[in-house]
Amino acid sequence: MTSVRDIGKFFLFIAGGLIAIVVGSFMIRGTMHMWDKPENKKSDKNND
């Protein structure tokens, strides 16, 4: 039989993993936004 402490550790493990995924996705989105500048989009469209 599992104890309350084991259930709490499991819940914290799952919550920590979800938080890490959310923070990582925002960091990836931020770096992609830094690389994809509006000036580059306009120059690419004009070159086509």
Image: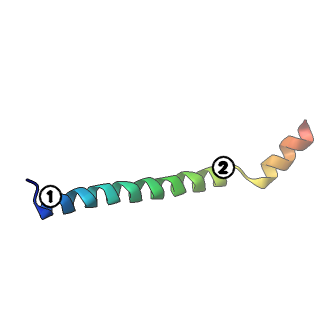
Q: Could you tell me which secondary element the residue under label 2 belongs to?
A: helix
Q: Tell me if residue 22 comes above or below residue 45 in the rendering.
A: below
Question: Residue at horizontal 90%, vertical 38%?
Answer: 47
Q: Position of residue 9 (x, y in %)?
A: 20, 59
Question: Residue at horizontal 90%, vertical 35%?
Answer: 48
Answer with the quarter of the image where residue 15 lies.
bottom left
Q: Could you tell me which secondary element the residue under label 1 belongs to?
A: helix
Q: Earlier in the sequence, mark 1 or mark 2?
A: 1
Q: Seen in the image, is 17 located left or right of residue 37?
A: left
Between 39 and 10, the residue placed more toward the observer is 10
Q: Position of residue 21 (x, y in %)?
A: 43, 53
Q: Seen in the image, is 40 located left or right of residue 25?
A: right
Q: Residue furthest front?
A: 1
Q: Nearer the viewer, mark 1 or mark 2?
A: 1
Q: Amino acid at mark 2?
A: Trp
* The label number, if any, that marks residue 35 in the structure image: 2
Q: Amino acid at mark 1?
A: Asp
Q: Residue furthest left?
A: 1
Question: Label 1 vs label 2: CA separation?
Answer: 44 Å
Answer with the quarter of the image where residue 8 lies.
bottom left
Q: Position of residue 30 (x, y in %)?
A: 59, 56
Mark 1 residue crowding within 10 angstroms, few (<14) / some (14–19) / many (20+): few
Task: Check contact, mark 1 vs mark 2: CB within 8 A.
Answer: no
Question: Residue at horizontal 65%, vertical 54%?
Answer: 33
Between 24 and 1, the residue placed more toward the observer is 1
Q: Seen in the image, is 17 located left or right of residue 8?
A: right
Mark 2 residue crowding within 10 angstroms, few (<14) / some (14–19) / many (20+): few
Residue bearing the label numbered 1? 6
Answer with the quarter of the image where residue 46 lies.
top right
- How has the structure been colored for display? rainbow
Question: Residue at horizontal 19%, vertical 59%?
Answer: 7
Q: Position of residue 5 (x, y in %)?
A: 13, 63
